Amino acid sequence: MYFSKIVFFILCLSCSIGFSQSENDVYGKINVDKKDNFITLKAEVNNDGLLHIDKLFYNLIALKKGKGGNYSNNRQSGEFSIQPNENMEVSTIKVNLNGDEELKVYLFIKKNEKLISKDSLWILPKNIQQEVADKTDEKDFFLKGIVVDEAITKLGKDYHDLFYQSYLLSGIKYPFIIKIKEKPGMGRTSIILVEVEEIKIHEFFSRPDEEFLKSNVGVALERLYFYAKQREELRKKSKM
């Protein structure tokens, strides 16, 4: 009986070590193809190990800064699996970049909410050929405070404006993109959603009432605060 327990413990330990090593064998990189003002960004993931790995998650983000200082962003994310010794392209983003514009690109690869690989590059306006590798921590990277407007009605856009104003005044800049989304509801109403990393934070039926919209801004900001807190706790535990 005692011997069986020892064997079981050794087997579990071996599986744990093997899985950890398999994670270390997976890495992502950003490939760039430039043709005039058109840039194609490709997120590539490689598995140099001997194990099949599933339930991986990629996050590819391109942030463009225009001549006037305005920002636009394109983000793609999704779940994938990869075979041993496989080299695969998980995402592609195409960007039109003028010589006076700046582009920053970030790629994160996760497994069970743990960051296992990252890559980043800059294309600067003064010299479009110069790509600068940037040591980026997901907690500190450049996209802090970004709110994306995906509303489809005036009420939805009004909510986005109210939300963004309150978010700026709060002085908090979360290290993730917040999306204000909207979809058709019943009759003339619509459903407004606040979403982060494919997770629904808050949802409500629209109503042409400014105080009602403001109250839902407050609810969303409160829930975002607790989401960010739990997210950070999980991130710290994954590093232990």
Image: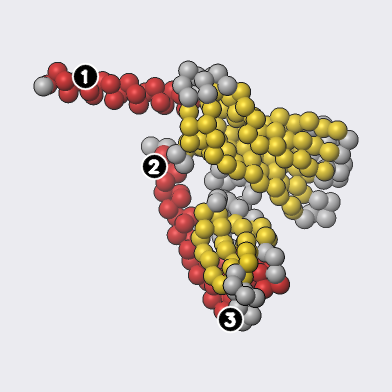
Q: Which residue is mark 2?
A: 237
Residue where numbered disc 1 is placed? 7
Q: Earlier in the sequence, mark 3 or mark 2?
A: 3
Q: How would you rate the neighbour count of disc 3 (Cα within 10 Å): few for under 14, some for 14-19, many for 20 or more?
A: few
Mark 3 — residue? 211
Q: Nearer the viewer, mark 2 or mark 1?
A: 1
Contact flag, marks 3 and 2 (Cβ < 8 Å): no
Where does residue 50 sit, x and y in percent of width and height?
Answer: 48, 18
Label 2: element kind: helix
From what the image shows, is residue 118 above or below residue 71? above
Q: Secondary structure at mark 1?
A: helix
Q: Give the crowd class for mark 2: few <14, some 14-19, many >=20 residues within 10 Å.
A: few
Q: Quadrant of residue 78?
A: top right
Whether residue 146 sits left or right of residue 4 in the image: it is right
Query: Does residue 17 appear in the picture of this structure?
Result: yes
Q: Is residue 67 above or below residue 205?
A: above
**Residue at image coords 83%, 55%:** 68
Residue flagged by tag 2: what amino acid is it?
Lys
Q: Residue at x 46, y 50 (%)?
A: 231
Q: How far apart are labels 2 and 1 at the CA level?
A: 28 Å
Q: Residue 107 location, x and y as percent?
A: 62, 37
